[in-house]
Amino acid sequence: MIKTHTFRKQPMPGGKSRAVRPADGPTVEQENMCEELKRTYTVERRLLDERFGRNKGKPYTPSPRYDGKDTRKTIEDNKRKQENTWLKVVRELLPARIHPCVYVRTIFRGITGTSMAPPYPHQLLSSKWKQFFHSESKRVLEKIPESFSTQNAFSASYLLRSQRILGYNLQDSVYYLLTDRLVPLTSLYRYGLAKSMLREPNLSKVDRPALFERVASRLERSAVVQYTQFSSQYDKHWADILPDGFRERAACVYGGLLKVCLDEGDNFDVQTAVTVDRS
């Protein structure tokens, strides 16, 4: 007589089932932060390449090996340990109360205008870049209030000379100030000044508001990049020149950069209603 065995059917996972995470695996918060860090690094790297004219070919995209994926192709590669670089950065910086995205943006902003090469993702946690971040962030935060006063004083002197000595009216004087690349004004200050010409009491003195609309449009992206790094500090010390609703607008524009930064061929000026707070 043949004996048969019956086995109970294995239970199927329900619709609300969730995969069990390994004990040493990343949390949901860490995974989200890793994705945001990756996109932020990509945006900053592409913006830097754009400034130096190195973005004519394929835009920069981080190697999959920084995500911990297997990209080994040679014998030497087999000796390299697979590691999620973004997760490593997040796990080291967050306990130190340093936002990983602010960390990356401060480094890239600091090397702008220098001969320093940008760090690769696996170099971000080196002692060199840690020291650079701490010194650069301290310098930038201390400079924000002072730079606004300095640029205000320079602009007032420039406009006074243009009107009293050269005989220009207010509209032409401000326009020449905004478009003069040699004057020591930041993109954010120029943008705010251009926007101020589109509201009273200046608007009634402007015959061609389209001039300042074009200037503001051209400066918007660089102004947003500057502002969103330390938005709370700029709100506190630059409130007199920032247009109403700029915090929301800046979040929208920078959120658009983050959203499309990994899509090949997308233009950096794509806008989206993604809210990203960089305070």
Image (cartoon, rainbow, N blue to C red):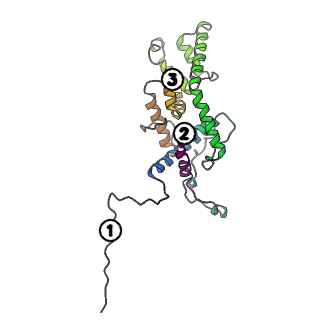
Closer to the N terminus: mark 2 or mark 3? 2
The quadrant in which residue 11 appears is: bottom left
Residue 11 numbered tag:
1
Q: Residue 86, image x and y in percent?
A: 55, 50
Per the picture, the main secondary structure of the magenta-coloured stretch is helix
Query: Considering the numbered disc 2 on the image, is that residue within a helix, a strand or a loop?
Result: helix
Residue range in magenta is 79-102
Query: Considering the numbered disc 3 on the image, is that residue within a helix, a strand or a loop?
Result: helix
Q: Residue 70, image x and y in percent?
A: 56, 60
- Residue depth check, mark 2 versus mark 3: number of the one nearer the observer: 2
Asked if one can make out residue 264 in the rendered structure from this viewpoint, the answer is: no
Asked if one can make out residue 114 in the rendered structure from this viewpoint, the answer is: yes
Q: Which residue is mark 3?
A: 192
Q: Tell me: 241 left or right of 167.
A: left
Q: Which residue is mark 2?
A: 102
The residue located at (57%, 18%) in the rendering is 152
**Residue 97 within the segment the image draws in magenta:** yes
From the viewer's perspective, is residue 164 above or below residue 37?
A: above
